[in-house]
Image (cartoon, helix red, strand yellow):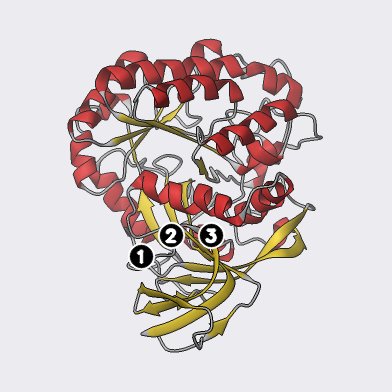
Amino acid sequence: MGDRETLIVRSRRTVLPEGERAVAVAVQGEKIAGILPYDTPADVDLGEVALLPGLVDSHVHVNEPGRTEWEGFATATRAAAAGGVTTIVDMPLNSIPPTTDPGALAVKRAAAAGKCAVDVGFWGGAVPDNLHALRGLHEAGVYGFKCFLSPSGVEEFTELSTGELRTAMKEIASFDGLMLVHAEDPALLLPPDGPTYREFLVSRPPESERSAVETVIALARETGVRVHILHVSAADCLEPVAQAQAAGVRISAETCPHYLTLSAGEDLGTESKCCPPIRDTGNRDRLWRGLADGVLSLVVSDHSPSVPELKRGGFDQAWGGVSSLQIGLPVIWTEARRRGHTLADVVGWMADAPARLAGLRHKGRIAVGMDADLVAFAPDGRFTVDAAALHHRNPLTPYHGRTLHGVVQGTWLRGRRVEPGASRGTLL
């Protein structure tokens, strides 16, 4: 395999920014130093196993400190590495304290130090009581600011009113920061009328997402802020986002593996409960078209785990969050290949675009000068998901028992292979 300073990996299916090519990738230290002819003598010859850039998952709830029994940096980043994800960006809530001021960010970084198998960055939070202090958190190193327009599910991270959203956007625009929005209009949400999935789905209609997205667009146009819509579930949101993008509003949007592969018509268990909810198959097809059209640019996990007891009971009571950090790549590849998409498409959605969103200039692509974050991925391999075998702290996933295409055979972080138990990740 070569030593730490030099490494050459070759594959007939290396996914470069311009598409798949048979090349050798030369690594010097922690960086990609060259793209060489395929017949270059190599330390690692993958043959027909694909070589991908390390994925970037910009939507992960690690929950440490404060709710580390739900998930923690050691377990989350071990799962990420096993799934070909070499960088995660941690969300500011579900940990205690939430990341809403520089002191809380310091607590979060201290909790993560020395535990991470992959590189980790941090989002900050925008809540009613910190709207005039966001610049300090930006200068402390967060990549942007997440807010909710409806209740977040945890009492220590409060949603913003429309007026507070405008105030936050003006402040963030003043230093050209990024605003991330959980977009559901609370005026259009209802308490579930019972424990079934159908009753839960009715309580969070697509109109609530579209209404919130339209509010965000109007305020983004007014303030000039760069804004990103998180976890789009309702395909009705695509039209206003596309129109805003065409009009020059600085807006992007993401969706998640569960919205692209599961549907409300299936026998869903509470492992699949999330907010906004998984909708019907017609809606799912429209989300795929939104990806193909570029209206949606990212696919990220929204890994939001909890302890098993919080997932028990009906859909009116269970915690809303899906665990899929380790298996997002094969989940998406299984469906993408069926729909005629390429590995290059998947890499664009799951590596390049999330890196660009967060401003991680050295991540997400196999190109000279980039971090040597690489993944050996057998696209024709198959496996059946066993929740108990995943590295997530709690063995819960809606994909348990599903047979998926695509097996991660190895992951390199900044030029070195990630070994079980290693904690070489950097806090970005």
Mark 2 or mark 1: whose residue is earlier in sequence: 2
Q: Is residue 294 left or right of residue 13?
A: left
Amino acid at pointer 3: Ala
Q: Which residue is mark 3?
A: 80
Q: Is residue 150 visible?
A: no
Mark 3 or mark 1: whose residue is earlier in sequence: 3
Q: Residue at x 75, y 51 (%)?
A: 400
Residue 267: where, in percent of width, then height?
81, 35
Q: Residue at x 53, y 20 (%)?
A: 239
- Of residue 90 and residue 129, the one placed in the foreground of this image is 90
2 and 3 marks in contact (CB < 8 Å): no
Amino acid at pointer 2: Arg
Assign the C terminus to one quadrant of the image.
bottom left
Q: Residue at x 34, y 25 (%)?
A: 248
Report the label total. 3
- Disc 2 residue crowd, few under 14, some 14–19, many 20+, Cα 10 Å: many
Residue 274: where, in percent of width, then height?
61, 33
Q: Secondary structure at mark 3?
A: helix
Label 2 – label 3 distance at C-alpha = 17 Å
Mark 2 or mark 3: whose residue is earlier in sequence: 3
Q: Secondary structure at mark 2?
A: loop
Q: Which residue is mark 2?
A: 365
Label 2 – label 1 distance at C-alpha = 7 Å
3 and 1 marks in contact (CB < 8 Å): no
2 and 1 marks in contact (CB < 8 Å): yes
Residue 394 lies, with reference to residue 14, above or below; the image says above
Quarter of the image where one finds residue 215 = top left
Q: Secondary structure at mark 1?
A: loop
Q: Which residue is mark 1?
A: 370
